[in-house]
Image: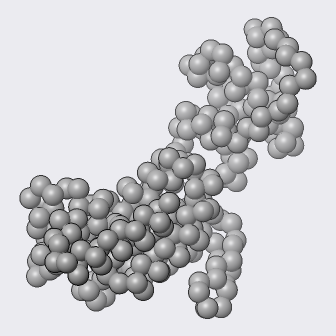
Amino acid sequence: MLILANLLIFAFQMLAESNSWKFEEVFALHPAEMVSGNVWQVVTFQFQHNDWVHLLINCLILWWFGRQMESFLGRVSFLKLYLSGGAIGGFAQVIWTFLFDKDVLNVPVVGASAGVCALVAAYAALNWDQQFVLSILTFRPFTTRGKYLALLLIVTCGLEVFYGSEQIAHAAHFGGIWAGLVYIRWIIQAERLWNVWEALRARIKPRPLIERVEPPTEIHFEAIDDMPEAEILNDLPADEFMEREVDPVLEKISAHGIESLTEREKKILDHAHEIMTGK
């Protein structure tokens, strides 16, 4: 749907240019106008492009990385990442222009590149220590890890901010990259108990019920506390640990709220988080 939106708006953009409509003047990102009150431009500029090549490159990368990120985050969180990454990239471009490049204050900025950079950086953050293969267009495929891809993005875009062409909004790309990294590492994967619970709940597969059984809640949780701590946190295989130890804790949260957890049950969730993230 985002790709379709980009295509349709680009077609309308071409139509507006041929009829001398002030479409780009209103919806492209103009740093001088944005700080004067046209704040909507940090969103609308993401759906305009300079030409077909610009549009094609952004749509291809959006397709490659967007599918992966949407399947992991879900539609709403994915859209938040994409649009906020583009907006933060737009703000970064405006700040850079005012501080270091005032000659282009009235030059319009367009393109989905900042949001796309946020998606690529977010993908790198999710696969921080995992190996994966990248094959970009006709270039030779290469194997890398998320942290190396993130470092490559930061270094190359950072250098381009200072030494790259003024015709390209490199500061917007740089801002989008950091937005993607922050969104994953410090929001989605934040070391907070509530986010641990949300991450665990998202991975619980529903099990078919043959017969509904209501176990005595208090006895069940007391039985957990009677088990040796070493067995709970260290000795069980990952699958068995999730089934025997984590599921009852999640049921307790559903029944009584997260505030009802004991210190021991919090440790169980912490250990589950370590298993899933590989930390």
Q: Is residue 199 visible?
A: yes
Q: Residue at 15% of width from left, 61% of height from top?
A: 34
Residue 40 lies, in percent from the top left, at 23, 56
In depth, the one of 142 and 60 nearer the eye is 60
Q: Is residue 165 above or below residue 151?
A: below
Q: Is residue 166 above or below residue 46?
A: below
Left or right placement of residue 20 versus residue 251 in this view: left
In depth, the one of 164 and 270 nearer the eye is 164
Residue 20 lies, in percent from the top left, at 16, 78
Q: Quadrant of residue 169?
A: bottom left
Left or right placement of residue 134 versus residue 48 in this view: right
Left or right placement of residue 156 versus residue 198 in this view: left
Q: Is residue 118 visible?
A: no
Residue 78 lies, in percent from the top left, at 51, 53
Q: Residue furthest front?
A: 19
Q: Quadrant of residue 114?
A: bottom left
Q: Residue furthest right?
A: 210
Q: Residue at 50% of width from left, 47% of height from top?
A: 76
Q: Residue at 36% of width from left, 74% of height from top?
A: 11
Left or right placement of residue 6 versus residue 243 in this view: left
Residue 54 lies, in percent from the top left, at 40, 82
In depth, the one of 43 and 216 nearer the eye is 43
